[in-house]
Image (cartoon, rainbow, N blue to C red):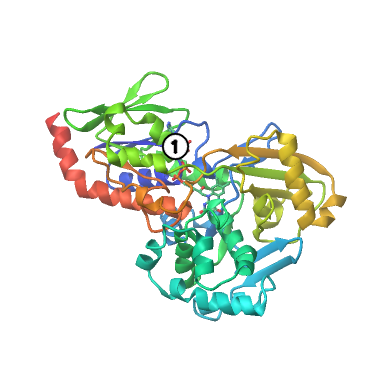
Amino acid sequence: MRAIIAGAGPAGFACAKWLTDRGYEVVLLEKRDVPGGKVSAWRDEDGDWVESGLHVFFGAYRNLLSFLDECELQDCFDWKPSEMVFASPEHGQTSIRFVPWLPPPINGLAGVATTKLIGLPDKARMALGLTRPIFGNQAYIDAQDEQTYAAWHLRHGMGEHSLRGVMDTMALALNFQDTNNVSAKLPLTAMLHFAQQPGAAKMGAIKGSPHERLWVPLIDKLEARGVQVLLNHKVTEILYDEMNNRITGFLLDDGSTITGDIYISAMPVHSLRKTIPAALKAQPYFDNLKHLKGQPVITAQLYFDRMVTHVDNLIFSAHSHISVYADLPRISPDYTKYPGSVIELVVAPAEKLINQDDETVLEQILGDFYRLHPEAREAKLTKYTLVRIPNSVYQARPGVDKYRPDQASPVPNFFLTGDYTQQEFMASIEGAIRSAKRTIERIDRVGVEVQEIAAEV
Ligand SMILES: Cc1cc2nc3c(=O)[nH]c(=O)nc-3n(C[C@H](O)[C@H](O)[C@H](O)COP(=O)(O)OP(=O)(O)OC[C@H]3O[C@@H](n4cnc5c(N)ncnc54)[C@H](O)[C@@H]3O)c2cc1C
């Protein structure tokens, strides 16, 4: 059996690995000249790494961690201290420290109890208001999808202070939008997973560029097992035989067609929509994809001639253009060769900035960064890079969750995978790996049927 996968991001790679385990011949197509999708990195003209996004792993990423174990890549990242560091011009740097010897969720609640981010009355109201999601179940959380998180928070007796002081930061880090826009389901899902699993909140960062630490070693392993990873191979159309209701090939941008027995789209939803043939577009399963819109985000890297931070961890922020950032030489051993700080920032919300010129974007980000780290004004900015991603993760807005597709499409030999498809987690690397797991379960389920159809043709 031959499987053709379009998209070499985390979900595409996981499908490739697990299908090879099952004896499939696998071809993995990627439109770009670098693998990794939203977790990719490439070198600029100076030989420095440009990353598509600052990526953090959590202890809650059980599927990702076990996938890395399976691929013998468990050493590609370092765990950081179990705390969330927040920066704001008003409070400076403050953190929520998870108490390691207490069981979840008490460890997190104890951390919130000691933070300077909000006052005592707000802490008490949060502890009461969040009881239901923290001790609850996914069914309750799923039912909250039609409202914004801000509406849910205020309705449950928690005030504006905790909304703006803590929860906006969390929503921005999770979906690059604040709580006035994001569905209540998203932060509540994160809280449920993080509150109920031991060690879920600990954070890890890749030891260097994801390209060198993750994708190159993974490709080597997959190629040694016969997987063909073809970069610069863009799928332009999914070829469909309406009479027999089956996919017959992927048309590529060089005009050639690649064929197999089963086909998997591991492309982001906006790219998938461009390749769906007219005969399938009208079907509700495919038509519903139009509700899943990508969220714009910008990744910036600022190079300074000296160290301007002291934190070996991610730093969260809100109410500026910066949502999460880290000093790469502090968090990743491969970046220590730089003499000064290399601050990688996730710029969100980015709707207003994404179409501005580089100088304007830089001016805004630098202004915000200097307000958070006034000492950086003394340092010289020696270089910067900006990566604009107009369609990053899907916008988890109220009412959108129901449009996320199952991995099995109405076409028996065509499957979807990727963080936007139905899975229990938010759009993330863990979500992508979970989606791949579900895709493989669907393929296993219909595998025999597809084999029979392939034999008949
Ligand atoms: C700035 C930023 C920061 C992030 N931070 C985190 C984080 O800290 N932790 C976390 O868990 N997640 C984070 N994420 C989210 C995470 O990167 C994504 O959820 C994850 O990469 C999704 O994986 P995927 O395989 O579903 O899709 P993608 O990573 O988008 O991969 C899809 C692949 O398909 C390819 N493709 C597209 N069109 C075609 C075509 N026509 N033909 C062939 N190939 C095609 C793309 O080039 C890409 O390589 C972040 C995302 C961004 C943008």
Residue visible at 41% across and 62% down?
Answer: 144
Taking depth in this image into account, of 428 and 204 the one nearest to the observer is: 428
Q: Secondary structure at mark 1?
A: helix
Taking depth in this image into account, of 233 and 377 the one nearest to the observer is: 377
Quadrant where the C terminus sits is top left
The x and y percentages for residue 15 are 36, 45
**305 with respect to 210 (left or right):** right
Q: Does 409 appear above or below 282?
A: below
**97 with respect to 195 (left or right):** right
Q: Residue furthest right?
A: 378
How many numbered marks have been drawn onto this rendered protein structure? 1
Residue 425 position by quadrant = bottom left
Can residue 44 be seen here? The reply is yes
Residue visible at 51% across and 55% down?
Answer: 182
**253 with respect to 88 (left or right):** left
Quadrant where the N terminus sits is top left
Residue 108 position by quadrant = bottom right
Per the image, the residue denoted by label 1 is 270
The x and y percentages for residue 355 are 64, 34
Circle 1: residue type: His
